[in-house]
Amino acid sequence: MAAHFDRRLRKAAVTTTVAAVAVAALSASQAPDVTADGNGRQTTSDNVPTSDTPAADSATGNSPYYTDLPPLNSPSPAPTTGTPTSPGSSEAGIPATVLDAYKKAESELRRAKPGCNLPWQLLAAIGKVESGQARGGRVDANGTTIGRIIGPQLDGNGFALIKDTDNGVYDGNSSYDNAVGPMQFIPSTWAWAGRDGNGDGKEDPNNVYDAALAAGHYLCRYDWDLSVQADLNRAILSYNNSQDYLNTVLSWLEHYRKGTHEIPDGTGSLPVGRSDDPNAGASPTPGRTGANPGSRAPSTPSPSKPPASEKPTKPGNPSTKPPTDPAPPTETPAPTPTPTPTDTVHHLENAGTTGLTATAGDTFAKKISTRAETKAGDAVGKVRIRFTVLGDTDATFTGGEKVAAVTTNASGVAVAPALVAGEQTGAFTVRATVVGRTVPGLDYKATVTERVADTLTSTGTKELTCTPGGEFADQVEVKATLKGAVADKVAVTATLIKSDADPVENDKGPYFKDADGKAVRTLAGRQTDAEGLLRLPKLYADDTEGTYILRLTTPGGATLDITLKVAEPAEPTPAPSTDPSTAPSAQPSTEPTA
């Protein structure tokens, strides 16, 4: 009893200090029916959980969490009849490997998404309430948990209803999903949010490095700045949509910000209070309909009373009829739940998206549009569609993410944020799926093409000449433009050709040198810089004299020919001598004199 009293007392104290800020921010942030702005950034209803947001849209599926709160820093408690204590009320520190995973995730997010301002203490706070820091740091040397951490199955019986999405690969359950790992991701969220945090080539929700990095990217997936309280609240609620959850995480965040320390793996304290425990003092979160079914006591039928009109009969009265058995009670069938819009989706259709092609580094001119339909082909509005970039590509949606969730409008159409091409060329796929329902996904093919230029010009004015067996004094430099504008990162190919009429690679004359010093007469893959400029390596000449052509080409059709001359230097013309001794002598005349 004292333990429960202490927990509730501390919970009330912390909630009082946190709730005012949180409620004020949340009340302003939960306006419904706003989707995305003109730039494709998901706004209010797309990135702020509301009371009817499906549990499948959260990281954890709104699974249970630990409700233990950090210790109160009260240096001199008032003398009373006794100071209540509770098991798990003290914080012993964070296990070394778990702490390292949080700090490495923070470092990576500082590099990848500096505007998010993710503190590692937030990951520690979430890790504390989700798994007690991986069950007190029970992880191996690589950060993988010793034994899997599996939440209860989300079968709608006391929890949200999320049917199996991974064939039991992560949670061992092929009927329903369970939250998995130290950060308690549900498989459907891990499918797109998973990250490789320890560089082993795998994305494992049971590895604390992978899970911590995935949680960081999940919390930073929108244009949220977690140094702003309102954005911080939104991010936490998107992880598990519960006001009690928000308050608990904020309490631990503040505690860790004041300081903590590293402890050996496996020696951390284990929490005791759970949100699905009716005696823990926390109210059920959205998506839960009651306490853990396993804790329910079996009901005992109470004896029925006789009807008031029924009077006892006197013994031996022959006119009294024996009582008849009452009619068996009629079972009232459970009401059929009204299907949600998501339940009515039968398939997805392309809503007119064609020609998804963009040049490297550019934004795709067209956005992907998907229509959700019933079996009869009717539009289904208010359904969440998840768009995921797949394949070997560095293309992303606006904001740098490879996943985006958008709600269909009244016409059943969801328009994905704009796609931004990376530097990697080639084809990739964007897949549209229905959040919270298993129907075949819809794939869109997209292609990234090379950067192009339509003009190449030489920046040099000197004639490029060289003696046989020598080297050219000046290097070739060119500038690429596209419609008059600088064309940066454009690939340029330089080839020494035989002639304008025979543009195959020459086998004699000027040449470049490769890394081993061998002669090469074709250079490919060189790119212009931010100013559209490219300087080629030094040119050399063999012993063959002549006039040669260096041809430069780019994707987009730009071509430039540069003339190179290899010749012996001209013989110098001697200057007239001024030495009298070398002057020609006067010849005697042979004419007779008069």
Image (spheres, helix red, strand yellow):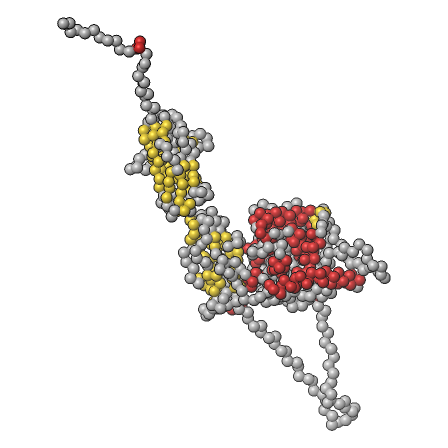
Relative to 484, does residue 462 appear above or below in the rendering? Answer: above
Q: Quadrant of residue 155?
A: bottom right
Q: Is residue 42 at all visible to an observer of this figure?
A: yes
Q: Identify the residue shown where x is 56% and y is 56%.
A: 222
Which quadrant is home to the N terminus? Answer: bottom right
Given the current orientation, which residue lies at the most extreme front position?
Answer: 594
Q: Is residue 147 at all visible to an observer of this figure?
A: no
Relative to 95, does residue 278 appear above or below in the rendering? Answer: below
Of 232 and 242, nearer the camera is: 232
Of 529 and 579, nearer the camera is: 579
Of 75 and 11, nearer the camera is: 75
Q: Residue 481 location, x and y as percent?
A: 40, 45
Relative to 333, does residue 296 appear above or below in the rendering? Answer: above
Q: Residue 423 location, x and y as percent?
A: 47, 47
Q: Identify the residue shown where x is 72% and y is 76%.
A: 301
Q: Identify the residue shown where x is 32% and y is 12%.
A: 579
Which quadrant is home to the C terminus? Answer: top left
Say whether residue 540 is left or right of residue 192. Answer: left
